[in-house]
């Protein structure tokens, strides 16, 4: 853990305090410290913030993959996604709880483990994954829903979804939070109704296809679920940094992580159950909604589209935070325009390409997300342990602050874990090829190597930093 004393004198310029709790206002500033007088909200709001973005078809599709592509039975799939989601939610708990204390975005806190300049590497990963990767992934699911519901051409449906999502980038934290609070209970009602119908028709006792995929399929599912849920961890403090510094850290982390775990596990379970019913439909959304009465199917398709917007409102916002943290100097208006236009256009193009084979593209993307998230979490958690309640404010915005050991441990862990354990169609690691029963445990290996490497390479450096103060 780091210092438990709330920051009151940030080194960098603080964000304007006039923004407060205004909803229909463009959020001023960029990645600055949020002054105490601008803080607002309660920890319980985090439950809705992290429920709404997962009430979409991308979440359901992880469950579909586990049974249809990874060869698990329903109960095996449920155990695997629950484990993967639990690991991701626990990480989210720890990172969300730090937000109110420090009042800065997650990627700014990441500078502690990587240094001011070294942090550009994980910030760039996040910018690409959030602003382009997840944007494209969720846009595909939303577009397929509109295509099925209204019969629109796929590209036109995709364009509508992208334009709706991109509009949120012109506002900011309060509007995004407000939208999630409204969307979450409405989406939950629709998906609960759809889920009850799916489970009433599902054959939960059906055996795994082709005799089952064994441990490899189980670990692939754990990795895919973890990649989905832990994919939110680099955003964690972005949405808790506006809470008053005096709020309970336990409640902040609990509501954020439980919203994440409950929504992901419930919808992945529904997705896994839907496969046991069987379907000849070509589109994943058609296959899922084909099991529902027409009225419920239409509402579910609409909910899928709205859920995609809810997810990408957060993706664009935090992608922008990561982009700003990379250190580009430009006016506020240009920053927002650049993030919106570039992420929207590139994300649209990537989503257009992925429309042709949503299943394969989604599986590959989720595993690749986990590849870099694992080492990143290893560095972040190792750094928290080594600092143990020591002050960190002076380092967060200091361009001279370096921690090359952290960046080195991250890169070593990322490269080594991929070379040894990756299990993709286009590349199979040395260990994965020798022991295929392992499935794909790249994210586990990356976390362990980075965590141990950080202790080895940065422990003495951190000790010297505090001795010199």
Image (cartoon, grey):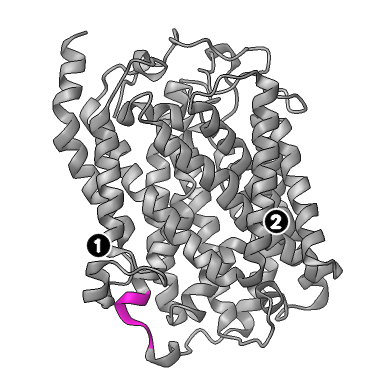
Nearer the viewer's eye, disc 2 or disc 1?
1
Quick check: 200 left or right of 9?
A: right
Q: Main secondary structure of the magenta part?
A: helix
Q: Is residue 313 above or below residue 425?
A: above
In the foreground, 130 or 415: 415
Q: Quadrant of residue 468?
A: top left
In the foreground, 105 or 136: 136
Q: Quadrant of residue 379?
A: top left
Q: Which residue is mark 1?
A: 420
Highlighted magenta segment, given as a residue range: 212-217
Q: Which residue is mark 2?
A: 187
Question: Residue drawn 31% across and 31% down?
Answer: 113
Quick check: 224 left or right of 452?
A: right
Q: Is residue 251 visible?
A: no
In x, y percent, where is residue 259? 53, 49
* Classed neighbour count for the residue bearing mark 1: other residues with Cα under 10 Å, few (<14), some (14–19), many (≥20): some
State the separation of the CA atoms marked 2 and 1. Answer: 41 Å
Q: Is residue 15 visible?
A: yes
Question: Residue drawn 23% across and 43% down?
Answer: 451
Quick check: 273 left or right of 436?
A: right
Q: Is residue 398 above or below residue 88?
A: above
């Amino acid at each position: 853990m780091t210092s438990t004393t709330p920051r009151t004198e940030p080194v960098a310029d603080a964000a304007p305090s006039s923004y407060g709790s205004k909803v229909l206002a463009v959020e001023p500033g960029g990645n600055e410290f949020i002054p105490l007088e601008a803080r607002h909200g309660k920890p319980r709001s985090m439950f809705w913030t992290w429920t709404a973005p997962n009430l979409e078809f991308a979440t359901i599709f992880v469950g579909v993959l586990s049974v249809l592509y990874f060869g698990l039975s329903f109960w095996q799939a449920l155990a695997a996604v629950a484990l993967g989601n639990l690991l991701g939610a626990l990480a989210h708990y720890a990172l969300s709880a730090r937000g109110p204390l420090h009042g800065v975005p997650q990627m700014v806190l990441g500078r502690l483990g990587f240094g001011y300049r070294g942090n550009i590497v994980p910030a760039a990963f996040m910018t690409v994954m959030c602003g382009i990767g997840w944007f494209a992934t969720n846009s595909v699911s939303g577009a397929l829903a509109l295509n099925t519901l209204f019969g629109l051409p796929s590209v036109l449906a995709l364009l509508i979804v992208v334009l709706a999502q991109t509009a949120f980038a012109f506002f900011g934290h309060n509007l995004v939070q407000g939208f999630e609070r409204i969307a979450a209970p409405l989406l939950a009602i629709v998906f609960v109704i759809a889920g009850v119908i799916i489970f009433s028709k599902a054959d939960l006792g059906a055996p795994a296809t082709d005799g089952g995929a064994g441990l490899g399929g189980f670990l692939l599912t754990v990795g895919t679920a973890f990649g989905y849920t832990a994919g939110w961890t680099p955003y964690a403090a972005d949405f808790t940094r506006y809470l008053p510094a005096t709020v309970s850290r336990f409640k902040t982390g609990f509501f954020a992580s439980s919203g994440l775990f409950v929504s992901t596990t419930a919808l992945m379970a529904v997705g896994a159950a839907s496969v046991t019913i069987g379907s000849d439909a070509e589109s994943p959304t058609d296959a899922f909604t084909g099991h529902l009465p027409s009225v419920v199917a239409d509402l579910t398709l609409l909910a899928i589209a709205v859920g995609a917007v809810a997810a990408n409102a957060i993706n664009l916002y935090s992608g922008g935070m990561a982009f700003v943290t990379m250190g580009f100097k430009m006016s506020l208006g240009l920053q927002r325009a650049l993030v919106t236009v570039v992420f929207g256009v590139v994300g649209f193009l990537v989503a257009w390409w992925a429309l042709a084979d949503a299943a394969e593209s989604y599986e590959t993307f989720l595993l690749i997300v986990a590849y870099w998230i694992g080492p990143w979490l290893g560095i972040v958690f190792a750094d928290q342990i080594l600092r143990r309640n020591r002050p960190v404010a002076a380092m967060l915005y200091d361009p001279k602050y370096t921690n090359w050991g952290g960046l080195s441990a991250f890169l070593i862990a990322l490269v080594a874990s991929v070379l040894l354990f990756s299990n993709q169609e286009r590349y199979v690691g040395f260990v994965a090829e020798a022991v295929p029963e392992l499935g794909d445990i790249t994210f586990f290996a990356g976390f362990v190597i980075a965590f141990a490497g950080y202790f080895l390479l940065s422990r003495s450096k951190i000790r010297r930093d505090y001795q010199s103060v």
